[in-house]
Image (cartoon, rainbow, N blue to C red):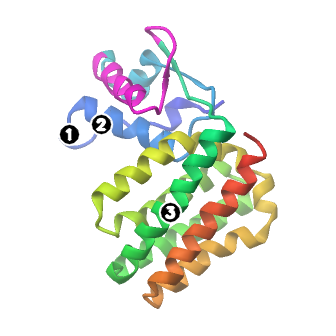
Amino acid sequence: MTDLMGQLEPRQGFNTLTQHAYDQIKRALIAGAFEPGQKLTVRSAAAALNISQTPAREAIGRLVAEGGLDAGTTRSFSVPSIGKTEFDEIYELRILLEGLAAYYAAPRFDSDKLRVLETCQAALAAARKKKDYKEMLRQNEIFHFTIYQSSEHKLLVNFIEGLWLRTGPLLNKLYPDYTLNVENAQFHLDALQAIREKDAEALRTAMQNDVRAGGVFLRQLV
């Protein structure tokens, strides 16, 4: 069971409390910080974010409407589980849309963004050695969305986020067994090389291969 207090951060800056709560919980769901079936209450979210229960409730309500959480009682919510049919549909879309975002991103990458990815990949490799699977999930999410956001296609990124919102919690099932296949680690390295060469088609292929490989493994567990 994930420690909620360790996954959500108190508000900083000037965004509204509701928006901050929404962003924090959504990113945690996308990154796999929560597991399918895990319970979430307004009280626990509010305490973790150091805010009152009203904005926490409003944020959770938005995520329920978007399919990221299931409503149980008025005070309790849960992370949804999905079946094979929905899983197949989501992963078919993920492969298409994430490949497209990667293709658009390749010519737009600069040296600063590339360094972010290289640092992220190094942190992911270090976490793998330490068997810190939560950190691996966090770095994996950063790696993917650094690429997708670099596409500068906001609507496309929003669609991809919506799909990850449904499948992020499943990523917990990847580890530790998925790390035993060293070939899977190669896809991020392929993506980095494609970015260095500004090869849009190669970047599309690398990211699609990464999504597809994880999907094939996860489908056995759905």
Look at the picture and state if 206 lies above or below 149. below
- The answer to whether residue 139 is visible is no
Circle nearer the viewer, 3 or 2: 3
- The answer to whether residue 24 is visible is yes
Along the polypeptide, which appears first: circle 3 or circle 2? 2
**Is 150 displayed left or right of 204 in the figure?**
left
Kind of element beneath mark 1: loop
The image quadrant where one finds the C terminus is: top right
* Residue 38 falls in image quadrant: top right
**Is 201 displayed left or right of 13 in the figure?**
right
Residue at 27% x, 29% y is 18
What is the x, y in percent for residue 188?
59, 72
What is the x, y in percent for residue 80?
57, 29
| Contact flag, marks 2 and 1 (Cβ < 8 Å) | yes
Tag of residue 20 = 2
Look at the picture and state if 1 lies above or below 115. above
- What range of the chain is rendered magenta? 54-75
**Is 191 displayed left or right of 11 in the figure?**
right
Residue at 56% x, 44% y is 168
Count of marks, rendered view: 3
The span from disc 1 to disc 3 (Cα, nearest Å) is: 33 Å
Along the polypeptide, which appears first: circle 2 or circle 1? 1
Along the polypeptide, which appears first: circle 1 or circle 3? 1
Tag of residue 15 = 1
Look at the picture and state if 215 lies above or below 18. below
Q: Residues within 10 Å of mark 3 (few under 14, many from 20)?
A: some
The kind of residue on which mark 1 rests is: Asn
